[in-house]
Image (cartoon, helix red, strand yellow):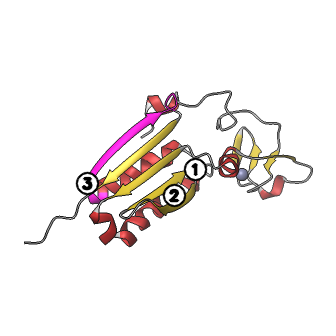
Amino acid sequence: MITRRELLSEDTGSPYYELRKYPEPTICSECRLVYHKGRWTDGSSLLKGAHRELCPACRRIQDRNPGGVVYLNGSYWNLHQQELLQIVKKQEALAREHRPLQRIMWIKPNGAAGLEIATTNLHLARRIGEALHHAHKGRLDIKYSDGDRFVRIYWSREEKQKP
Ligand SMILES: [Zn+2]
């Protein structure tokens, strides 16, 4: 679910604004998405003579400026890395089927018992956090900043000691 707060979170003057209008057709000079009929889509048939511009996702990747960051923490993460990482990757794959601007920018270690996942879009960061929480419980905290244009998602769980 996309909240009203998230719908209002995009600044129309921002280069990352996903609903901005472009000349048609426009092609992303990085990933080749095509802006056609008001949407960024995978449209390899329309490319001849197209205007070239970075799409919002590639612009974020080039600028290393994520729309959201997910932090995984706790001993449970250390013990279940593969399972949890699968959930993260699956959420990206699901998102990209219909929202090709929603991508993971990087996944890197965050301290001794943690992981940092940056996404091009705050909705994807939230979906990842909610999917982890849904499947593995733990604690989920969602913190918006920059006038709700950026989100930090904290998911943590400590493994219970076996008796
Ligand atoms: Zn692109």
- Mark 2 lies on a secondary structure that is helix
Mark 3, other Cα within 10 Å: few <14 / some 14–19 / many ≥20: some
- Cβ atoms under marks 3 and 1 closer than 8 Å: no
Q: Residue at x 21, y 64 (%)?
A: 159
Residue where numbered disc 3 is placed: 138
Name the spot of residue 24 as percent of width and height, x first. 82, 40
* Left or right: 8 in relation to 44: left
Range shown magenta: 135-148
Mark pair 1, 2: CA separation: 7 Å
Name the spot of residue 12 as percent of width and height, x first. 65, 27
Tag 3 or tag 2, which sits nearer the N-term?
2
Q: Amino acid at mark 2?
A: Glu
Residue where numbered disc 1 is placed: 102
Considering only vertical position in the picture, is 146 above or below 41?
above
Residue where numbered disc 2 is placed: 92
Considering only vertical position in the picture, is 125 above or below 75?
above
* Left or right: 127 in relation to 103: left
Magenta stretch: includes residue 146: yes
